Image (cartoon, rainbow, N blue to C red):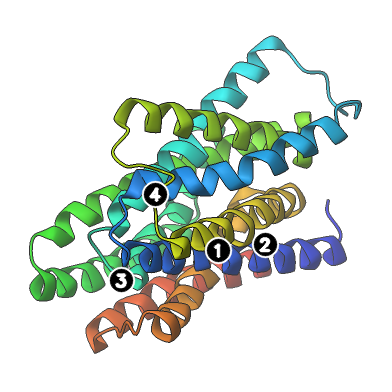
Amino acid sequence: MKSTKTFVYGVLIGLLGIVMFSSKAVMVKLAYNYEVDSISVLLLRMLFAFPFYVAILIWNRKQKTTLPLEPRDYYWLVGFGVIGYYSSSYFDFVGLSYIKASLERIILFLYPTMVLIFNKLFLKQPISKVQAGAILLTYLGVLLAFGDEVSISGSDTYIGGIFILLSAVTYAAYLVGSGWLIPKFGVTKFTSYAMVVSCICVFIHFLIVNEADIFGLPRQVYVLGFLIAIIATVIPSFLVSKSISMINSSNFAIVAGAGPISTIILAGIFLGEVLTWLQLFGALVVIAGIVIVSVRKGAD
């Protein structure tokens, strides 16, 4: 049983990681102001992040694992690297080209509920009646916010929403898988391996698509790409993995409730985005669903 102190530290580390991750959507939207495509921004993110993860792997190459590793564990790691930080990131970046950052985070926030569902389906972890009610409340909030935006922005919102939903599904799958594999590889090694796999996938994707001249972009795009890589990728990826190892993936899904709030605030400051009253109410309903689960967890 984890101590209360460890749990509190895990929550705080998770919160910091979530807030830093939340800044990604805002910086991606800022990059799109320079008429750059989504795969180019994603490529810059991975290009700047890749050396850090390789260096960390080399630094920790002699670190021994606490649990025995089997060949299939490496196959799973590659699979979750593809699903998590490649597929999820690509869907997210494409979706952001259609909808605003604050709405993106509200929709993406479905992934904590998906973690609970995946844990139930694949790891046989029970979902209480309170958790089930909170999940329904969360989906109701998303539907309210999304439906209102459709009436304002039109059919493009559907396209963006579908991509963000796919991002949520794939990221939830990654979180569940990482909760199982992190104890075997260790936080640092697992995160680095998964990110290196994701980077390679993005490099291959760009070489196949090759939609833009990566060396002819505006200077501001490179700066934003670097910030996305370090502030919104490298640092928070380790914080999130560390948090999961300390409080488990289901509890981390609850901590992730800070994501929509931080994104809404950052999007308002840097992008001038303003939510309608109905969208704000939907966001609050989403957050309320997670708070209910959190209170229930504390009672248990």
Of the residues shown, which amino acid type is indicated by label 3? Gly
Q: Any mark on residue 14, and which?
A: 2
Of the residues shown, which amino acid type is indicated by label 4? Gly
**Is there CB contact under 8 Å for labels 2 and 4?**
no
Nearest to N terminus: mark 2 or mark 3: 2
Expressed as whole percent of the image width and height from the top left, the position of residue 124 reads 54, 35
Q: Is 80 on the left or on the right of 132, as rendered?
A: right
Q: Is 255 on the left or on the right of 148, as rendered?
A: right
**Is there CB contact under 8 Å for labels 1 and 3?**
no
- The residue labelled by disc 4 is 216
Q: Nearer the viewer, residue 236 or 241?
A: 236
**Disc 1 from disc 3: Cα separation:** 16 Å
Whether residue 168 appears in this view of the structure is no
The local secondary structure at tag 3 comes to helix
- The residue labelled by disc 1 is 256
The local secondary structure at tag 2 comes to helix
Q: Any mark on residue 141, and which?
A: 3
Of the residues shown, which amino acid type is indicated by label 1? Ala
Residue shown at the point (67%, 62%) measured from the top left: 14
Nearest to N terminus: mark 4 or mark 3: 3
Nearest to N terminus: mark 4 or mark 1: 4
